[in-house]
Image (spheres, grey):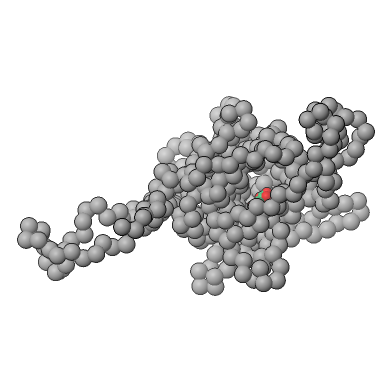
Amino acid sequence: MAKRTLDAFFKPSAPPPKRPKTSSEPTTSNSTTSPEPPNIPTEDPKPPSQHPSYPFPIPQLPSHISIALEHATPATQPKKTTNQPHLDLLTFQPYIARQTSTALFTFLLQSLPFYRVTYKIRRGPTETQINTPRFTTVFGVDSTSTFAQTDTSSPLGLLETHTNNPVPKTKYQCVPRPIPACLDLLRRTVEKANTDSKGRTPGYNFCLVNYYASGEDSIAFHSDDERFLGAQPNIASLSLGGERDFLMKHKPFVDTGVSNGAGAAGTRVSGTRVTGVSGTVSGGGLDGSATTPVQQIKMKLGSGDMVVMRGETQANWLHSIPKRKGRAGEMTRGRINITFRRAVVPGGTDNYYRYNVGSGGMYRWDEVARKMVLQDDGKTC
Ligand SMILES: O=C(O)CCC(=O)C(=O)O
């Protein structure tokens, strides 16, 4: 008998082969075929997630995906990588088995609102317009506020976590969006799959979603080291759909000439999107004096793969998804990435909505055009 993978088990069932009817089976008046056996799973569409902050209701996961997420993740045990200075990675290849992850990719592509955010940055007298080179969306709120059902007939309200008082309208620049049920189930399973270096659960309160439509879409070298994430943030990054390269490189060091005795004799250059990395970290050897080569990391992330970046990783390493040029770019399939994070102050909420929802139009996947299409009535923050 052909071996059936766990993933295949969770696929929507094909109708069973017709079998000969026995005399004891009841018949129906308009049918001459046998009735379906009672154990065929049927889709019971659950009501979509609704909230005044959503531009449209967000459907719930079909049950074949939610059952697979709840019962068949992690699909493999994680590999721990700590063989380079300041690096602490957990890699699940995959976290969600391929067939389920592909179904989840299609579902999220069709079900979420997306944005192509533009913003201006100023360096000295020069103002530059930045066009985010991918589609983005975000849900969640930092830990100073909590979404709560205050009465059954109203949408989720936003309360101050410590007092339970309603959050004043002026607290946030954009209206925070509760994590819809489809992403919240994913958030809960990812949270169970890993801990921080002290064994604590990550307590994710944000889902940031990127959609890379083609090889032209990318994210530049950066680190998720903002203060609003607290010290040593735990960030889980899940890939769905087409395979892409994920690159990591150590941040540059400025030689202060003074060894701190704890490893790297240098000061980290802070900030994002830094290019140019020195190839070594001084003082990383066993006797504290040798020079440890720091290697760039290149991983191919396929559908369902998950990388968890922990400990000192964000403070010291940059990561990126580079563009794919030429034939490789043309062949590149769409990819969704979801990062699960925990922001601890309102500045994190403002930052995430500003750069992942913004104030431009909203896009939705168009199944006929097979691409994201700008919606006239897109509600942005
Ligand atoms: O798409 C990815 O794998 C990386 C996403 C990322 O780095 C980010 O959202 O900050």
Residue 338 location, x and y as percent? 59, 50
| Residue found at the very far left of the displayed protein | 23
Looking at the image, can residue 29 be seen? yes
- When asked about the image quadrant of residue 342, the answer is top right
What's the residue at 60%, 54% (across, down)?
Answer: 301
> In the rendered image of this protein, does residue 200 appear above or below residue 71?
above
> In the rendered image of this protein, does residue 231 appear above or below residue 296?
above
Looking at the image, can residue 356 be seen? no
Q: How many marks?
A: 0
- Compare residues 373 and 339 and report the one nearer the observer: 339
- When asked about the image quadrant of residue 215, the answer is bottom right
- Compare residues 75 and 114 and report the one nearer the observer: 75
Left or right of 255? Residue 334 is left
What's the residue at 62%, 27% (across, down)?
Answer: 198
Left or right of 217? Residue 181 is left
Left or right of 91? Residue 130 is right
Quarter occupied by the N terminus = bottom left
> In the rendered image of this protein, does residue 363 appear above or below residue 356?
below
